[in-house]
Image (cartoon, grey):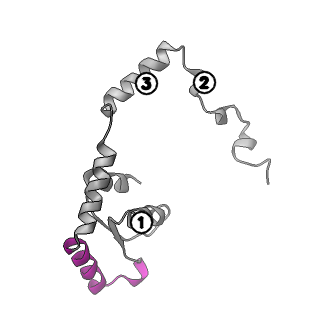
Amino acid sequence: MGGTTEAVYHGVPVIGIPVFADQFANVLRLVRMEMAVELPFQQLSGKVLQEAIQEVLHNKKYRENAKTRSNVMRDRVLEPLDEAVYWVEYVIKHDGAHYLKSSFSDLAWYQLYLVDVI
């Protein structure tokens, strides 16, 4: 997810070649945003890669959509450090703000891992 987030943040179109785990979902998300082209690893060749590069370089929609998503992601009320400081101070001010704590932390291990459902 880190590379996906970085691509969106910096407004960079992507040629995604998913191989493992969450890469498939991440590339699909970028393709749906129309800021990426997906290349199946099994069908990868020099010609296919060259065509994908040409598509991303010459079709303006990828760059425009990447920039639009970047602008949305960067549109923040506070800078990340200021927001972190705010929340730390908020929790201190409100005696730990226990109401923000997830109820998952109160579950027994067998409930958390759904052993009781199996």
Residue lying furthest left in this view?
58
Q: Amino acid at mark 3?
A: Trp
The residue under label 2 is 99
Q: Which badge, 3 or 2, comes first in the chain's sequence?
A: 3
Q: Which badge, 1 or 2, comes first in the chain's sequence?
A: 1
Q: Nearer the viewer, mark 1 or mark 2?
A: 1
Secondary element under disc 2, as helix, strand or loop, is helix
The reply to whether the C-beta atoms of the residues labelled 1 and 3 are less than 8 Å apart is no
Residue 56 shown in magenta: yes
Secondary element under disc 1, as helix, strand or loop, is helix
Query: Count the marks: how many?
Result: 3
- Percent x, y of residue 25: 48, 63
- Percent x, y of residue 82: 32, 27
The residue under label 3 is 87
**Residue drawn at the location 35% of the way across and 56% of the way down:** 3
Main SS of the magenta part reads helix
- Percent x, y of residue 86: 39, 23
**Residue drawn at the location 61% of the way across and 33% of the way down:** 102
**Residue drawn at the location 59% of the way across and 22% of the way down:** 98
Q: Amino acid at mark 1?
A: Arg
Residue 74 is tagged as: none
Q: Amino acid at mark 2?
A: Tyr
Q: Report the Cα–Cα distance between label 3 and label 2.
A: 14 Å
Secondary element under disc 3, as helix, strand or loop, is helix
Magenta range: 41-58
The residue under label 1 is 32
Q: Which badge, 1 or 3, comes first in the chain's sequence?
A: 1
Mark 3: give few (<14), some (14-19) or many (20+) Cα within 10 Å. Answer: few
